Image: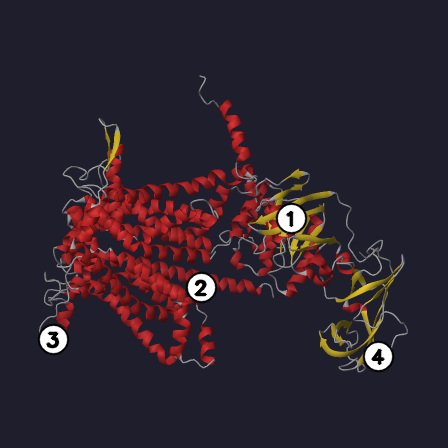
Amino acid sequence: MPGQLTPGRLGPLLSLLYRYGPPRWSHYVKTHWSGQRLVMAIPYLWLLLFFAVPFLIVLKISFSEVRLAMPPYAPLWQWAEEAHRLVVSFNFSNYLFLLTDALYVSTFLYSVKVAAIATLFCLLLGYPMAYAIARATPTLRNLYLMLIILPFWTSFLLRVYAWVGLLKADGVINNLLMGTGLLDAPLTLLYTDFAVYIGIVYSYLPFMILPLYANLEKHDPQLLEAAADLGAHPLTSFLRITWPLSRPGVIAGSLLVFIPAVGEFVIPSLLGRSDQLMIGRVLSDEFFANRDWPVASAVAIAMLLLLLVPIVLFQRFQSREIGGRQ
Amino acid sequence: MKSRGWFRHSVLALGLAFLYLPIVSMIVFSFNNSRLVTVWDAANSPTLKWYRLLLTNEQILGAAWMSIKIAAMTATGAVILGTLAGLALVRFGAFRGRAFLSGMTTAPLVMPEVITGLSLLLLFVALEQLTGWPQGRGMLTITIAHVTFAMAYVTVVVQSRLTGFDESLEEAALDLGARPAKVFLRITLPLILPAIVSGWLLAFTLSWDDVVISQFVAGPGSSTLPMVVFSKVRLGVSPDINALATIMVVIVATGVLLSTWWMRRQERRRAREVQMARRDDQ
Amino acid sequence: MADKPPESTSQRAIEPGREYVRIENVSKRFGDFVAVDNVSLTILKGEIFCLLGGSGCGKTTLLRMLAGFETPTSGRIYIDGQDMSDTPPYARPVNMMFQSYALFPHMTVAKNVAFGLEQERLSRPEIERRVTEMLEIVRLGELAQRKPHQLSGGQRQRVALARALVKRPKLLLLDEPLGALDKKLREHTQFELINLQERLGVTFIVVTHDQEEAMTLASRIGVMDRGEIVQVGTPTDIYEYPTSKFVADFIGSVNMFEGQLVEDEPDHVRIRCPELANTVYVDHGISSAPGATVWVAIRPEKIELSRQRPPATENVQQGVVKEIAYMGDLSVYLVKLDNDRIVRVTLPNVERHADDRISWDETVWLSWHPTSPVVLAQ
């Protein structure tokens, strides 16, 4: 057939490619080409399909109108047969709704507040712990690290659930306090902001401690000796030497706690208030209870925009951390 | 220095107590006879009745089996993809799209689960509309979703192992006549095996534990264990969940303790051998 | 620049081997950085060739291009007459001994040595035979079943050597082969390495920053600086007849004086150095215009010290001993001239105990033989 590309016709094409390809093309092909391309392509395509593309779909649906059908949203573009043109109906009403509805605004603010306070508590508890582990003898250090990581391997859901039993009005803590005569009436602990802080700090503590430990462990103890030798009080040494050097660890740990905590779903569902929801719960409710996919998508996009800066910060840090060791 | 040591040590003790208090309380109350989870029924305890109840609960057992299957498939898939991604990121230098790949592998580490869950569900719906695949949602979609977020963790683990690894070992193998694929199988893979094993276990745990993403991408009749547990505990405390938690803690603790003990024994033996070998030069 | 004597006698005889490796105008750039700059070099069959230079001079990059781990940005590399520039490392008839030894930690000594043979798809008994034979040669027979971490530094070095040599390469590349060993062991291993090389007739290319190592091992040395080969020659050539200030200064220590050529005859030259009171007389001619700026380099061990003024009017200089460093086998004297210039002189400590040794603050006369100074133009 005249128009077809036969192997014979491919020859000149290939030689063109060869001539204008990257320098040392032949060597490249021989030594690295096939394997390297394959190794790269498999995870790349997977992440492209299951991580990047889904975000585009969420973005697209967030501009759609809700309708009663399956799937419950109107298509963004349509080929109008009679007019011979593409009709694109961008719809900003979902975002407008988010911005004007007091419920959503307050939910966003509340989520950020809860995540920020919980992160701070996590840091206050985690820093001295990481420091103590980093300064312990090697045998004890391994033991402590194992103790920190061990709960992480057991179910997160079950460990959060355990706090329900501890914090309830007739729970372990109240029983204990009343039993010792410290209290006359039970404290309201469960279904409060406090319970959510406890839940987040409890669940995410290892994520705070491990990067901090990795950082603190690298510090040369002679730095502190040198500071002491130069007449610095231990507190001064800490503030002027240890703390500034550990800042990358503090930032990494805090981001590892803060970002997922903003969108946390399980902890506030089990331990939190029912009159003030967090954003993860609202998204889930919009989606499952109200079947409003476009608004749920808009909530997701808004959350992403909110977390964009911390996520980019985290990625910067992560690649520097790994790159620095290379 | 010494005088300030007490502070960090007491915080450490406090923190560890904080981490273990709920676990200990669950274990204790799993043997409690009373239905009221928090009131110790001294007369009839300890009892194994919640364990009996749990192990005859078809729904829980079925969900557990489903979760194990999904977790095993997830871990295997995530290890393969994560290892390839780690290799590409550490060994291939600067290639086009490297920053994008690195971004896509680190973002899932911190991405709120509701977003990942929602976006994957919308993808599956759109894919089914377009291509007819995947048909409905169930084990397959849950596994795909879990692989996607678990592979990020595997990538990090493999990446850090690869960066701390003498590249001249691979070059030596090339130099001795092994082709790149062979070098990977005979040298790289055995040496990063510890990272791959811990990556597998990590991915298994993450999948086994996940409730939020599963809720989005699961279909009718494909409830994982965390989903069943979540719907149960949302309604209130139930003592058989304490028993479930206890069983899991015992399994995990035994595994971790055994592996720690084994690793320490290996390390000691190795240190002894290294010391003995050093004498041979003298 | 200095005329070479017809024959250097102190050197091991080099077989007049044929050309084995040819490096032709090879350059390697990493971004803007030029690691290797237009190097051309010929290496003969059966010799030990040392690439000597400081860190970052490009010697390791050149070695890695020979092994195939780096591709030259431009230029060609021929091994045994074949263009190797595009051949991947696993297809080259070349083996390398790595600086870190790169022993596979998960394999025993025997498995490490067998690895290369397995890639050639030899039969099991053949592999076993050759591994055993090789381990005997490097005296590691009993340690065949040990893992690398169970070996001492010296044993690891021998495993690395055995692993590279068992493939019977025609060319062995050694990257700082003795760098990881302590001083005592190093000397012993140097001679072992030479013996082995002579026995197996393999061509060695050694990269090192250690001039002593290069001097003892090499039949020829190529000195590298900032990506370029600055001089190639036998160890004696390099030490006694450096062709540039860089080489004279880099190899051993040297006293360097700037001066003007005042007389240039076929059989001698005279140089006036502002820092020295008398002219320097050298007993061979150089081909340079009178009046040209040159440098006179004199090795510390080639200067004599005496309390009395030597009879000559040239090649003598007065000074005061400012510092004496006792090094055991020799002593280093730092002698200060009137113009504050310090001259370094070394004397062997021939006698165990000498009362009349020259001591601090004594006024002394320095003198040297007309054959000793090297005259350098650059």
Residue on which disc 2 sits:
B268
Q: Nearer the viewer, mark 1 or mark 3?
A: 3
Image quarter of residue C240: bottom right
Number of residues whose C-alpha sits closer than 10 Å to that of mark 1, classed few (under 14), some (14–19) or many (20 or more) = many
Single out the mark in the foreground, 1 or 2: 1
Q: CA distance from mark 1 to mark 4?
A: 53 Å
Total marks placed: 4
Task: Please indicate whether residue A63 sits to the left or right of residue C204 in the image.
Answer: left
Q: Are marks 4 and 3 on the same chain?
A: no
Q: Is residue C364 left or right of residue A209?
A: right
Image vertical order of residue C198 relative to residue B125, above or below: below
Question: Percent x, y for residue C82?
Answer: 66, 38
Identified by mark 4, the residue type is: Arg
Q: Which mark is residue C172?
A: 1
Circles 1 and 4, Cβ within 8 Å, touching? The answer is no
Q: Nearer the viewer, residue A273 or C172?
A: A273
Residue indicated by mark 3? A183
Secondary structure of the residue carrying numbered label 2: helix
Task: List x then y, in percent, for residue B196.
Answer: 39, 50
Q: Who's the residue at 33% across and 78% down the image?
A: B6
Work out whether residue A25 or residue B270 is closer to the camera in this orientation and state it.
A25
The amino acid sitting under disc 2 is: Arg
Residue appearing at x 50%, y 45% in the figure: B183
Does any portion of residue B100 appear in the rendered image?
A: yes
Q: Which residue is mark 4?
A: C307
